[in-house]
Image (cartoon, rainbow, N blue to C red):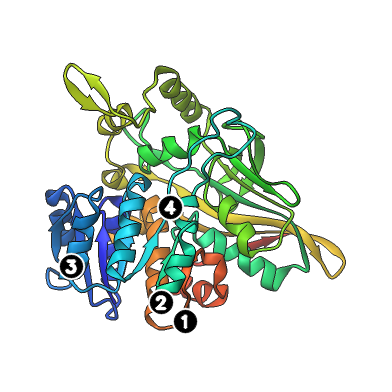
Amino acid sequence: MKVLLVGTGGVGEAIAMIAREHPWVKKVVLCDYNLKRAKAVQKHVGDKKRFPVEKIDASQRKQVEDLAKKHEVDLIMNAVDPVYNEPIFDAAFNVGVNYMDMAMTLSKPHPEKPFEQCGVKLGDYQFERAREWEKKGLLALVGLGVEPGMADVFARYAQDYLFDEIEEIGIRDGANIEIEGYEFAPNFSIWTTIEECLNPPVIWEEGKGWFTTPPFSEPEVFEFPEGIGKIEVVNVEHEEVLLVPRWVKTKRVTFKYGLGDQFINVLKTLHMLGLDNKEKINVKGVKVAPRDVVAACLPDPATLGDKMKGKTCAGTWVRGIKDGKKKEVYIYQVADNEECMRRWGCQAVVAQTAFNAVIGWDLLTHGIWKGKGVLGPEAFDPIPFMERMKHYGFPYGIRES
């Protein structure tokens, strides 16, 4: 497989580091607006021939198209903030190659009832074009990171193998990671974090469809495995709620994330001051988006690995009926930061996201996952994916009650 990797931030770097171990990965073109960053990743990977470097502006569709043609790639992998999804997604369609991302096109809140009704939903732009992709014989595999991605695979596995009837599927994400030397330092893209956490969370219910609630609603305490322990989690906007009901039969889908009081208060303050705004404003004659300023003031998550300690857990909690009895399971993956740094030189949160994309490449390359149109991970057989997880260094676990 030959891949145009758009974005060499923390997750892009981790994708490259994991991919280099697999000889079926023939070429990964490391593309970034920051050429110095792309070259640093190339040096970390240590293979200039298989991992060439290109400068790119991901907002410019034609640049993406030109590089895809230049390198004759099979797939365009989107590893940048989802604000750039539309031009990258459209570029893949125009060139006639497959596409993959880890976060879908952005939502827009309902103009009148943002905390009750959906406006533009995550992924609407992509799913509205599904028929065109299908007619052209192309595949856009959307939402294949850890969450969304691995968590969606687990949802399909629960339906196919663990339950006769599912009442609720809830993605639950928590960690005990600490970052030394920083009072506030997100371990993932702050741009994406603000988008997810301050937008109205979406819930899906049978007979009602998709609807929204206020940010940080419905708090509950969830106990995470492998020593992480009990953490309060709250509703957050996330792609699984938009993906799972399309392929998995259930009565309710939610996504809850363990943010912590400090993190929530910071996000609320940013919102109160308008610093979460992604539209550019005039600052002494310079056009700048406040959210970009916030991101520039914080440390790059890709550089925090040696200062991070602890574990992060992503998983899918399912309750329902099996053989006439009530049943609950939590299918999860726990990544230890020290182990990730030792093996790949990448911090746990980005490595845990990245390995799923490379497994996706593996399954597509070897013809195990096949499809046309715009599809989520739930559309495919979960077994081959889950069988590969241990081999890739990220084994899953199942807790049953």
Mark 3 against mark 1, which lies toward the viewer?
A: 1
Residue type highlighted by circle 3: Phe
Q: Which residue is mark 2?
A: 364
Quarter of the N terminus within the rendering = bottom left
Report x, y in % for residue 94. Answer: 30, 65
Quarter of the C terminus within the rendering = bottom right
Name the residue nearer the viewer: 31 or 314.
31
Mark-to-mark CA distance, 1 and 2: 6 Å
Mark-to-mark CA distance, 4 and 2: 19 Å
Q: Which residue is mark 1?
A: 368
Residue type highlighted by circle 2: Leu
Q: Which residue is mark 3?
A: 51
Name the residue nearer the viewer: 1 or 333.
1
The residue located at (27%, 50%) in the rendering is 9
Tag 2 or tag 4, which sits nearer the N-term? 4
Say which element carries label 1. loop
Q: Which residue is mark 4?
A: 103
Whether label 4 touches label 2, CB < 8 Å: no
